[in-house]
Amino acid sequence: MAGAVAAQAQTQDIEVLHYWTSGGESKAVNVLRQRLEKEGINWKDSAIAGGGGANAMTVLKTRAVSGDPPAAVQMRGPVIQDWADQGALVGLNAIAGNWNRELPPAIDAALKYKGTYYAVPHWIHRVNWMYINKPALDKVGGKVPTTWNELFDLADKFKAAGIIPIAHGGTPYHDGVYFEGIVQSMGVDFYRKAILEQDQATLTSPKMVEVFDILRKSQRYFDDGIQGRPWNIAAAMVIEGKAGMLFMGDWAKGEFANANKVPGVDYVCAARPGTEGMFTFIADTFVFFKQRNQPATPAQNKLASMIMDPAYQAEAALYKGAIPANTTVSLSNFDDCAKKSSNDMQGASRANGLVPAMNQGIPEAMLGAVRDVVTRFLNSNQDSQSAVQALARAARNN
């Protein structure tokens, strides 16, 4: 029987729909592809760039409606449970083994629907992360800020030294990433109720007005060239010492690594002000669509098992700038930022501070609506109270 299954797997192709197309992402994908092909399974690549995955999801919907979904698909967030509820995905309990002990509980829960695993995680990204140019920090005699007041004090020092205080990319994506960090600084319970649960009383509270006040004050420390600037160009400004601080998830660490910058020497990575003890995550996962309405194929099971293999997780996470999802993986080859990230994740998990980031924890329509409100605020003279009302309306309508 085992020989028959192996023979079937050796003759199979598996189509993989994903949107990992940048340099580090492609390297991580190739690790998996090469491992799979060593097992005699042909990886049929369907990479669709752009839109932060929106383009790939559009293709997926079209293919699924026509009854021809790809066998494996990159996916994250509540849409996993939506597809599972429709009966489109194969369950993975048969190969899940010790996943419930190898994964932090909050991430384990994000993979399931009604007690069944439908997704497998490649790695974990931390979003509430900031980077500071270390020589610039030393030059102005500053320290890593742990509150927004300390951050603005440091920003003033950078400004006085002729350094752009905050490198920002003027896109809805980067605006949203910056905004969610301020919301999180109000406390993990506030973030849960406001963003993950869209509680109207929380969204219209004085604390949310304070969030927009901090956002408006932060804007004073951006430079004039932010419009349309990609986040990686903003990262380069900090790498080169033109700017002091960057607010972006740990995938930005790849930009520092590619420039041969060393954490603790050339730059500092730290939790954003007010979020020490909290870890906001993105779990990049694969799901597996039923083929001709059948249970999981041998190739799907092989790929899912391979993704949770500690050797793959260690290698791929290094390329991606993330940390392994599997907590049993050794971090001996990882840099100090990754080691801090892993320690912080496990500490946050124990203290109920491990929560999904915005683009992990809320539906796509709501995510777009929040970003629209924030970007409109940053590109107008709108007052904070009015912005709060706009945010609450967006939550009601999405």
Image: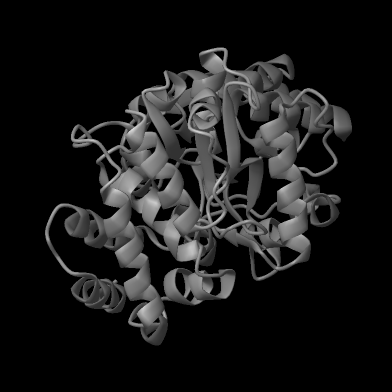
Residue at the limit of the structure toward the bottom, as seen here: 201
Q: Answer above or below: position of 28 versus 17.
A: above
Quadrant the N terminus occupies = top right
Quadrant the C terminus occupies = bottom left
Q: Answer above or below: position of 365 versus 245.
A: below
Residue at the spot 66% in from the left edge and 55% down from the top edge:
91
Residue at the limit of the structure toward the left, as seen here: 381
Residue at the spot 66% in from the left edge and 30% down from the top edge:
317
Image quadrant assignment for residue 326 = top right
- Does residue 166 appear to the left or right of 115 in the view shown? left
Image quadrant assignment for residue 68 = top left
Residue 166 image offset from top left, x and y in percent? 36, 39
Residue at the spot 79% in from the left edge and 26% down from the top edge:
311
Residue nearer the viewer, 57 or 325: 325
Residue 395 image offset from top left, x and y in percent? 31, 74
Residue nearer the viewer, 333 or 13: 333
Image quadrant assignment for residue 168 = top left
